[in-house]
């Protein structure tokens, strides 16, 4: 975790009822203050914590440089945690770029499906209560023809990179892989005579992003993503033959073409509720089964979006996937 996440960590663990036994920071000189503020043990090394800490769940709120190495040491630490039945959750995607994995052990872990077992990305929109309840409704609603998604959060809740990864995972699951992705990135300093370009990694990416996704059969999706909001919220509007569905943090509402209510779901739990709930599931080992993240596809989609924001052109995630994950 970083110094700006102390309030988030305190609130989430209090809400979940999980006892917080230790904390650490990528900037080790800040670890003592964080531990003192949260009233727990100071943990200075993430790899050592993964391989030796006596706990049920470990939340990586800010991975720092963890997972950004081709040496395999970080992956081995995750394997060791998995072997000890330590559930590992992360607010940031690990690895953070499709470009980081070719020629490394991460490729093997992705192809073998082990990455999903070793580390869980949270809070994952597909695991939120509203989307879990929506799954059954979509079987009747039919194919989503077009969709608009907004995911915004405060920087303490995760980076823009995390929102882009989560958004692509959601779109991939609900609509499939797009043929072309066009994106624009706006840094927090843009509009003041400065225009920054996004890198090709999700790591430490901050600001706003708009994305247009086009599918080979003519379907479409648009996205607005940001880590610059005062409060986090997510909204999706989906159009199809069955009418339209509006999904937000409090549930969903499905109305047919005439405006009649077909189905709905209400969930009163909101602030940090999905994160706390997903940590509880990991800690207890009890929860609904969810389809795993298709890392090769999702990372290729995020790479295409970041590349498009630099080139100003539409990019093919399938071409990137073949080049980086099958080359």
Image (tube, rainbow, N blue to C red):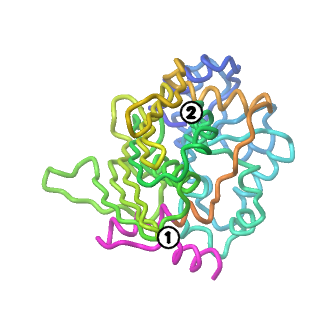
Q: Position of residue 291 (x, y in %)?
A: 70, 49
Residue 49 in sight in this render = no
Q: Which mark is residue 29?
A: none
Residue 176 within the segment the image draws in magenta = no
Label 1, secondary structure: give it.
helix
Image quadrant where residue 41 sits: top right
**Quadrant location of the C terminus in the rendered image:** bottom right
What's the residue at 50%, 36% (across, down)?
2
**In this view, the mark in front (1 or 2):** 1
Image quadrant occupied by the N terminus = top right
Q: Is residue 190 left or right of residue 287?
A: left
Task: Report the magenta residues as a range.
Answer: 301-327
In-image side of 125 versus 107 (left or right): left
**What residue appears at the point 75 percent right and 59 percent down from the top-left corner?**
113
Please identify the residue farthest to the bottom as the structure is shown. Answer: 327
Q: Residues within 10 Å of mark 1 (few under 14, many from 20)?
A: many
Q: CA distance from mark 1 to mark 2?
A: 39 Å
- Please tell me the numbered disc located at residue 317: 1
Badge 2: how crowded within 10 Å, few (<14), some, or many (20+)? Answer: many
Q: Residue furthest front?
A: 258
| Up/down of 303 relative to 61, above or below | below
Q: What secondary structure is the stretch in magenta mostly built from?
A: helix
Q: Secondary structure at mark 2?
A: helix
Sequence-first disc among 1 and 2: 2
Residue 194, position in %: x, y? Answer: 18, 57
Report if residue 306 lies within the magenta region: yes
Residue 108: horizontal and vertical position, in percent? 74, 68
Residue 35 lies, in percent from the top left, at 59, 25
Q: Quadrant of residue 227?
A: top left
Q: Disc number at residue 31? A: 2
């Amino acid at each position: 975790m970083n110094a700006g996440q102390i309030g988030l960590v305190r609130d989430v663990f209090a809400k979940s009822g999980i006892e917080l036994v230790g904390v650490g920071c990528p900037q080790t000189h800040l670890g003592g203050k964080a531990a003192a503020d949260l009233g727990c043990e100071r943990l200075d090394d993430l790899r050592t914590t993964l391989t030796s800490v006596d706990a049920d769940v470990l939340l990586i709120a800010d991975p720092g440089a963890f997972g950004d190495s081709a040496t395999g040491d970080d992956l081995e630490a995750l394997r060791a945690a998995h072997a000890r039945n330590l559930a590992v959750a992360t607010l940031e995607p690990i690895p953070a770029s499709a470009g980081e994995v070719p020629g490394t052990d991460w490729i093997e872990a992705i192809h073998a499906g082990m990455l999903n077992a070793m580390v869980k990305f949270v809070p994952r929109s597909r695991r939120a209560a509203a989307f879990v309840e929506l799954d059954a409704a979509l079987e009747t609603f039919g194919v989503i023809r077009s969709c608009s998604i907004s995911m915004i959060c405060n920087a303490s809740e995760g980076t823009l990179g995390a929102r882009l990864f989560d958004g692509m995972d959601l779109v991939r699951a609900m609509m499939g892989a797009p043929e072309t992705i066009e994106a624009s990135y706006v840094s927090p300093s843009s509009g003041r005579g400065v225009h920054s370009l996004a890198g090709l990694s999700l790591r430490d990416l901050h600001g706003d992003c708009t994305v247009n996704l086009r599918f080979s059969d003519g379907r479409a999706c648009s996205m607005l993503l940001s880590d610059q909001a005062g409060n986090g919220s997510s909204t999706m509007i989906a159009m199809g033959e069955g009418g339209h569905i509006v999904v937000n943090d409090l549930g969903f509402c499905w109305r047919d073409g005439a405006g009649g209510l077909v189905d709905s779901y209400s969930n009163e739990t909101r602030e940090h509720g999905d994160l706390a709930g997903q940590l509880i599931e990991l800690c207890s080992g009890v929860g609904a089964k969810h389809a795993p993240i298709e890392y090769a596809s999702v990372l290729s989609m995020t790479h295409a979006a970041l590349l498009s924001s630099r080139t100003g052109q539409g990019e093919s995630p399938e071409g990137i996937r073949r080049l980086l994950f099958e080359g």
